[in-house]
């Protein structure tokens, strides 16, 4: 019986405002009905003239009464909710999420699942934890790029444990009033403790924790830093409080930034004891994700998830989901009942390259762009040791007049000198191709971030200043000590950068100069078709008896 009363008391603490408003509304309704009956009894005893006069006044007053109440009551209750559940007093309105993500539905992140499985086991079996003399893991930080399933995994953990999930985002604690963020943090954990007592446990999920958990700093006089520091301090206090009370609360946080970008006090042992790195899926995981999403739609039986997985290197689960969804829209637009490989190919282009632009090129611009892109393609095919050219176009996308798309034959996570030099050569190939064809160059090779020269300079700069690959032999990450370097040292490093660029330019000029027929052929094919796919690109080079420089040429291509 005491247990039942305790649960009723906790339930009242959680939902007291709603309960009181419900009671108040019911009381007003009952009093209104009683008042009507009372007035009716008194109304029957009045004279006819008096009755008509009162009836007339009531007819005039009733619309005014209704209008006033329709305006004032929502304002009154709205202000009450604002101040008591997320407004002026700093409370945070957060309800437990209704989640039903099954553990088997989490695919494409097997490493992260193994880490999370231990946490689930300890949450479900507290006796096992006590038997080994351990303490429950109170904080778990999930790190990784966006779209890789951190939130999805947190929901699956809550479902698997059978515990309520309190979801919130870090930006909820960044406010314009000093102290409000700390008050909201306190409100969140107060609610979590009540839910834990009511339902036997609770998981607090804070997405984008870096919004408030950046390193603390001194206040500059406006109070912003003080408020941020107070929020972090309150968060640390709550985490330490969880260690001292067996309330069965676990905090799961997610972030896209590196661990060293968060406050060091948050990351120390005893707070976030477990760190789960959620990475982009590998080949087998991408295959499983494609199979999962294609199973939920009507797809042509010939659609091969393995083929799609090989094509979509470095795709996140969100990218794959978006690609399948886009393919469904393409099929619907063309009145087909099932998604075909062609639909998925169109969707792939949408995800990777974006929509086609409405820019209309002049005839001269088309010719110039065709040779510009042909230069990229020829060098990428003949000189890049790891990449294949899978698409070339002179149809404008995302502000560019054309592009080639090259992709690693297999997933790579580091680059050596040959790979970096090949990237530079592909970038400057457009400049050399324009020189060879037109004896002059265009603004298409430069002009800001993302341009050919910008990319080439970035790679050459990194090789010299960060990777120790310059001709002078200087080693070390010079960017870290740039302010202490002498002008002479900087000049030597910059000479190394220019030496790499000039050397790559010379190699490209020799390759293109001896392969002008294939450059001409490629450009003319682009002018005729505007877009070339992988098979068409391979056919051009095979006509001239040329093979790809890719080290993995024997790998099946997409």
Image: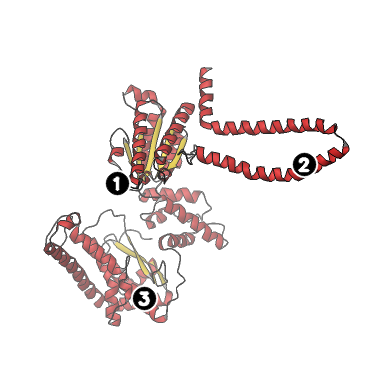
Question: In this orientation, which residue lies closer to the viewer: 396 or 409?
Answer: 396
Numbered disc 3: secondary structure: helix
**What is the distance, in whole Å, between disc 3 and disc 1 at their CAs?**
44 Å
Pointer 1 local density, CA inside 10 Å: few below 14, some 14–19, many at least 20: few
Which mark is drawn over residue 370? Answer: 3
Location of residue 483 in the rendering, given as x and y in whole percent from the top left corner: 17, 57
Q: How many marks?
A: 3
Q: Earlier in the sequence, mark 1 or mark 2?
A: 2
For the C terminus, the image quarter is bottom left
Identified at 22% across, 72% down, the residue is: 505
Question: In this orientation, which residue lies closer to the viewer: 211 or 223?
Answer: 223
Seen as rendered, the residue at the extreme right is 48
Identified at 35% across, 26% down, the residue is: 244
Question: In this orientation, which residue lies closer to the viewer: 182 or 169?
Answer: 182
Location of residue 446 in the rendering, given as x and y in whole percent from the top left corner: 30, 71
Pointer 2 local density, CA inside 10 Å: few below 14, some 14–19, many at least 20: few
In screen coordinates, is 328 left or right of 262? right
Location of residue 289 in the rendering, given as x and y in whole percent from the top left corner: 43, 49
Labels 1 & 2 near each other (Cβ < 8 A):
no
Location of residue 304 in the rendering, given as x and y in whole percent from the top left corner: 44, 55
Numbered disc 2: secondary structure: helix
Numbered disc 1: secondary structure: helix
Seen as rendered, the residue at the extreme top is 1
Residue under pointer 2: 58
Residue under pointer 1: 261
Q: Earlier in the sequence, mark 3 or mark 1?
A: 1
Q: Which of marks 3 and 1 is in front?
A: 1
């Amino acid at each position: 019986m005491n247990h039942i009363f305790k649960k009723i008391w906790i339930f009242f603490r959680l939902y007291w405002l709603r309960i009181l408003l419900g009671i108040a509304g019911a009381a007003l309704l009952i009093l209104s009905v009683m008042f009507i009956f009372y007035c009716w009894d008194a109304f029957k005893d009045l004279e006819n003239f008096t009755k008509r006069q009162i009836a007339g006044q009531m007819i005039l007053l009733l619309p005014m009464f209704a209008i006033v109440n329709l305006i004032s009551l929502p304002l009154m209750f709205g202000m009450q909710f604002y101040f008591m559940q997320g407004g002026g007093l700093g409370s945070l309105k957060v309800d437990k999420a209704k989640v039903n993500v099954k553990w088997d539905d989490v695919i494409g992140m097997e490493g992260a699942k193994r880490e999370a499985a231990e946490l689930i086991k300890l949450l479900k079996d507290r006796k096992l934890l006590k038997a080994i003399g351990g303490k429950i893991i109170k904080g778990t930080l999930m790190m990784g790029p966006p779209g890789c399933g951190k939130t999805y995994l947190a929901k699956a953990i809550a479902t698997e444990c059978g515990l309520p999930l309190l979801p919130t985002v870090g930006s909820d604690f960044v406010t314009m009033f000093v102290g409000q963020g700390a008050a909201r943090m306190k409100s969140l954990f107060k609610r979590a403790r009540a839910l834990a007592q009511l339902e036997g446990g609770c998981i607090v999920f804070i997405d984008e924790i870096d919004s408030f958990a950046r390193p603390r700093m001194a206040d500059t006089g406006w109070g912003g830093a003080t408020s941020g520091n107070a929020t972090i301090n309150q968060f640390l206090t709550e985490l330490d409080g969880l260690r001292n009370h067996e309330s069965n609360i676990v905090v799961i946080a997610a972030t896209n930034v590196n661990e060293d970008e968060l406050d060091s006090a948050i990351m120390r042992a005893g707070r976030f004891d477990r760190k789960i790195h959620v990475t982009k899926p590998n080949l087998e995981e991408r295959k499983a994700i494609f199979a999962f999403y294609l199973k939920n739609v009507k797809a042509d039986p010939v659609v091969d998830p393995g083929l799609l997985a090989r094509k979509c290197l470095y795709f996140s689960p969100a990218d794959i989901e978006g690609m399948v969804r886009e393919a469904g829209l393409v099929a619907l637009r063309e009145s087909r009942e099932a998604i075909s490989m062609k639909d998925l190919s169109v969707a792939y282009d949408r995800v990777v390259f974006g929509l086609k632009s409405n820019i209309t090129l002049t005839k001269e611009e088309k010719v110039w762009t065709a040779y510009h892109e042909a230069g990229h393609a020829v060098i990428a095919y003949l000189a890049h040791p790891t990449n294949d050219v899978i698409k070339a176009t002179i149809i404008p996308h995302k502000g560019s007049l054309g592009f080639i798309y090259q992709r690693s034959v297999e997933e790579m996570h580091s680059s050596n000198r040959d790979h970096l030099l090949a990237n530079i050569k592909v970038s400057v190939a457009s400049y050399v191709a324009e020189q060879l064809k037109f004896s002059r160059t265009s603004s298409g090779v430069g002009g800001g971030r993302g341009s050919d020269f910008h990319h080439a300079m970035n790679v050459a700069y990194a090789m010299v200043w960060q990777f120790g690959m310059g001709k002078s032999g200087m080693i070390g990450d010079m960017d870290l000590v740039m302010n202490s370097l002498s002008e002479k040292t900087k000049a030597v490093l910059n000479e190394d950068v220019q030496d790499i660029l000039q050397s790559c330019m010379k190699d490209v000029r020799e390759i293109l100069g001896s392969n002008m027929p294939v450059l001409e052929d490629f450009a003319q094919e682009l002018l005729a078709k505007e877009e070339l796919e992988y098979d068409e690109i391979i056919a051009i080079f095979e006509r001239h008896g040329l093979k790809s420089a890719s080290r993995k040429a024997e790998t099946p291509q997409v």
